[in-house]
Image (tube, rainbow, N blue to C red):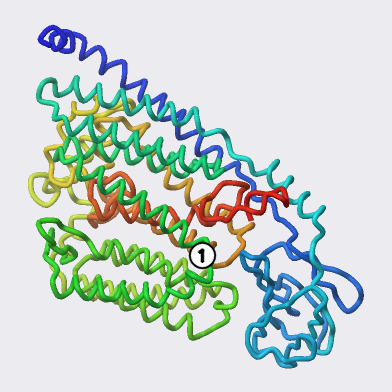
Amino acid sequence: MDTFQNIMTVMGPYYTAAVRWVFVLLAIFILVKSIKSLLQAKNPSEIWAYIGGPDGSSTPLKHWENVIGRASSADIVVNLNSISRNHGTLVRDARGTWRYNDLHSKNGSYINGVKVKKTMPLRPGDVLTLGGANFSLIPVSLQEKQQNIQKRKRKSRPVSPWTSLIALTVFQVLTVVQFKVAYGDDCPPSIPTSIFGLCAIMWVYFLFMRSLRRIAFEMETIAFFLSTLSLAATAVHTGNTMKQLICIILGVVLFFLLCWFLRDLNRSKEVRMLILGVGVVLLLATLLFGTTHYGAKNWIEIGGMSIQPAELVKISFIIAGAATLDELYEKGNLTIFMIFSGFCMGCLALMSDFGGAAIFFVTFLVIAFLRSGDFSKLILIVGAVALAGMLVLTLKPHVRQRFATWGHVWDDPMGTGYQQTRAMSAAASGGLPGVGAGKGWFHTTAASDTDLVFSLLAEEWGLIIAILAVLCIVTLGVFAVRSIIAGRSAYYSIAACAATSLFIFQTILNVFGALDLLPFTGVTFPFVSSGGTSMIVSWGLLAFLKAADTRQNASFAVRLDDKKEGGLAS
């Protein structure tokens, strides 16, 4: 054993010098491959049925949710004066059943002569009468359905995940060796145990999903890579990597459960109010029983453990804000979401968690725009919130201090600017490949593995890997926006865009706050920062993006088709 340790002592510096660049090359290979696959992913539109018009023409239905009306923005445009601009909606569910809903049209809607007062099923052969004009639903033939599925297979097949998984496994093994080199005999056994444990969880997950005939794992690969960096950051600061591993496992379980939950849109809609109620209870509990950390009362102590309920409310917030096409035309549904949004941001303001309030507000703006498309109202909302923010600056001293420090941290590097000046120095000292995991000095600074984790990454892992970590989050956002085109329900599109907007804005606050480009708000870096609740919720939010992925065999959140039809993803 002594001989091995002597060899490690002699060869350690050479290993660290070489492996830093190996880490960079592996990270580039893993992430560029996953990012490229996501950005090149094509979600070709499919024809789910046809709507036959009064003139004998037929219009293909390329989405599960379609608006019929005279407006140019409608999915099925009917140029008849007797038809309202947005006359009704025609929606398909996962079982293939089409249902029609009238949107308070001026001349009404009828199915087989029966007036549509609430949502009614529309079957092939039924006569749909809109403003005196007759329409019919025409199903696609089995041959056309098979052609659509084959087209989807050709155009949306992701790259094979196996080489990325092997590269990530090598990355994790080399990380363990690097910590052994850095710490020698003082290396706690929890570090290799947690990293190898994450590796095992990763392989079990992928093999299990392959047994379910799923083939796209870019998002999960990115999440597992960032989670590996999170364990490394936790190891050098607190060493409590086993706790972080447990939270990663809980996050993967939550991701799996939410994907299953989102498979049934009706189920998601039915329990929405219950989930909204849970969010309200969590925030009220924090206000009543929360403890204050770093000026914000956003923690609850339970049995020696600290949790941030406001993090969990992010999932409730997105579920409450997402809406199907029918719900977009219901003012009552929007009113409930507006009230819940105001309640959430008001509670966060009372807790002095203004970083969290800012994240919720930006997510609210994204959801509000996707639901209404009205920029003018958003401008009024932003103006009102800006005035409220100015009032907060006068009432909350610690918030005012952070804004006063913004852009002036070098004026008092040993006082109010202590953390950020050290963060910027550490980020600059790492260079492109970093100094090596466990070889830096910034880990001795408070919050180096949470609010300032970007600087820790830049110091020990290098600027290249730190920037790649940020690029991963941005890629998820680009994918979410592109998925809107082939989205099967407005619910999934809104939820995905809201979740990724939350990710991106939170990352911006974390990275730019550490570098003094924005006020320091104390928010976490998704998937990377140490912290149990943040990690669990990051995995949970990823489920909303996965549910929006309609590529063939890509998502567990999307049901498989009947094999007899030749398809796998419906």
Q: Identify the residue at image location x=56%, y=33%.
A: 160
How busy is the neighbourhood of tag 1: few (under 14 within 10 Å), some, or many (20 plus)? many
- Identify the residue shown where x is 75% and y is 59%: 47
Is 108 left, or right, of 447 in this rendering? Answer: right
Return the residue at label 1. Answer: 494
Q: Quadrant of the C terminus?
A: bottom right
Residue type, label 1: Ile
Residue at the image point whose x is 75% and y is 79% from the top: 70
Find numbered disc 1 in the image and state the secondary structure of the residue it sits on: helix
Tell which of 509 and 476 is nearer to you: 476
Task: Describe residue 520's horizontal placement relative to residue 89 as left or right.
Answer: left
Q: Report the number of numbered marks.
A: 1
Name the side, left or right, on which 453 lies relative to 496: left
| Residue depicted at 15% across the width and 61% down the height | 401
Q: How far from the left and from the top, in percent, is residue 362?
A: 39, 65
Image position, residue 124 (x, y; %): 79, 73
